[in-house]
């Protein structure tokens, strides 16, 4: 028997997959989402979301993409995930071209950039805002890449920029961006994501359980407070603690997750209270 069956849940509430339906509207995460949406709608050009590992940047990028794509006709939006630091400017430009809908991207850079610019003009003429979201952007680590991004951001219509780029990354992203200071000066909006506070942590846990089908209390409020103390409000750690606690509750035949069980799984995970 799985712990989902044991607790009467439809699915795992604390899976690591960033499923938009689990998005919790905390002040931090909604604040980021609203600010980024505003930057896109007002054609700020370059937006940066900074946050330490595990705070939910990837989740926000997926939620934002889902929101933009649900509004037919308003946006041409795509998400790029950078998985290693050895990518080249040519690779990135080609990926952007493909995501924007360029047919048969050219091999030489000059022609490729011309294709991208033409596509941006076409999208603007059609009344669409072009948006490229780049997750794990700290993997962009060469000056050439940032120079090419700056070049794309220089493409403008009569009154606004034709491309919006949103970079999601940890604090070291800002260090790599210093490779091209003129790009840094073009940042239209920057938001730094912080951990959840205790109230939001309790709300986050309850929200994910409810979305998964919980119809009764499963993790007590006191246990949620313990989760906050061990996780310091980091969603990734909250998920790990709660997922492990639900499994232990199944194994120990407990109907409620209480603080002692959180203490146990926190010890197993090597976490200590602040």
Image (cartoon, rainbow, N blue to C red):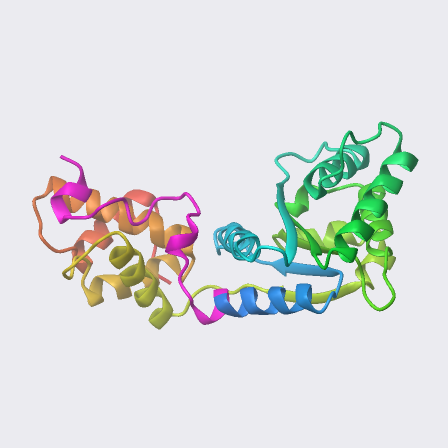
Q: Is 51 rendered above or below residue 244?
A: below
Residue shown at 27% from the left, 66% from the top: 225
- Please check the rendered image and state whether residue 2 is part of the magenta-colored stretch, yes or no: yes
Which quadrant of the figure has residue 224?
A: bottom left
In this orientation, which residue lies closer to the viewer: 128 or 242?
A: 128
Q: What secondary structure do most residues of the magenta stretch adopt?
A: loop
In the image, taking residue 193 as reference, residue 215 lies left or right, namely: left
Residue 255 in percent (x, y) is at 9, 52
In this orientation, which residue lies closer to the viewer: 196 or 116?
A: 116
Q: Is 15 rendered above or below residue 231?
A: above
* Extent of the magenta region: 1-29
Instruction: For residue 179, say whether it is visible.
Output: no
Which quadrant of the figure has residue 192?
A: bottom right
In the image, taking residue 150 as reference, residue 218 lies left or right, namely: left
Residue 154 in percent (x, y) is at 87, 56
Residue 237 in percent (x, y) is at 38, 51
Residue shown at 79% from the left, 31% from the top: 105
- Please check the rendered image and state whether residue 237 is part of the magenta-colored stretch, yes or no: no
Which quadrant of the figure contains the C terminus? Answer: bottom left
């Amino acid at each position: 028997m799985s712990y989902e069956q044991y607790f009467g849940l439809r699915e795992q509430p604390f899976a690591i997959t960033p499923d938009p339906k689990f998005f919790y509207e905390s002040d931090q995460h909604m604040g980021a989402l609203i600010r980024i949406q505003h930057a896109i709608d007002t054609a700020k050009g370059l937006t940066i979301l900074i946050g330490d590992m595990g705070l939910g940047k990837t989740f926000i990028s997926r939620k934002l993409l889902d929101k933009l794509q649900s509004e037919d006709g308003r946006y041409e939006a795509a998400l790029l995930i950078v998985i290693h630091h050895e990518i080249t400017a040519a690779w990135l430009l080609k990926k952007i071209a493909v995501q924007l809908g360029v047919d048969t991207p050219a091999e030489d850079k000059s022609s490729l950039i011309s294709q991208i610019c033409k596509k941006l003009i076409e999208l603007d003429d059609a009344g669409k805002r072009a948006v490229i979201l780049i997750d794990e952007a700290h993997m962009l680590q060469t000056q050439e890449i940032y120079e090419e991004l700056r070049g794309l951001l220089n493409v403008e219509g009569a009154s606004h920029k034709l491309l919006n780029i949103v970079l999601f990354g940890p604090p070291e992203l800002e260090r790599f961006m210093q490779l091209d200071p003129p790009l840094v000066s073009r940042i239209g909006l920057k938001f730094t994501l912080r951990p959840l506070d205790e109230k939001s942590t309790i709300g986050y846990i309850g929200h994910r359980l409810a979305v998964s089908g919980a119809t009764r209390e499963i993790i007590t409020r006191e246990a949620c407070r313990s989760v906050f103390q061990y996780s310091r409000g980091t969603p990734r750690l909250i998920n790990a603690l709660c997922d492990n606690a639900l499994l232990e509750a199944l194994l120990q035949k407990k109907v409620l997750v209480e603080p002692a069980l959180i203490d146990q799984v926190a010890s197993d995970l090597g976490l200590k209270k602040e």
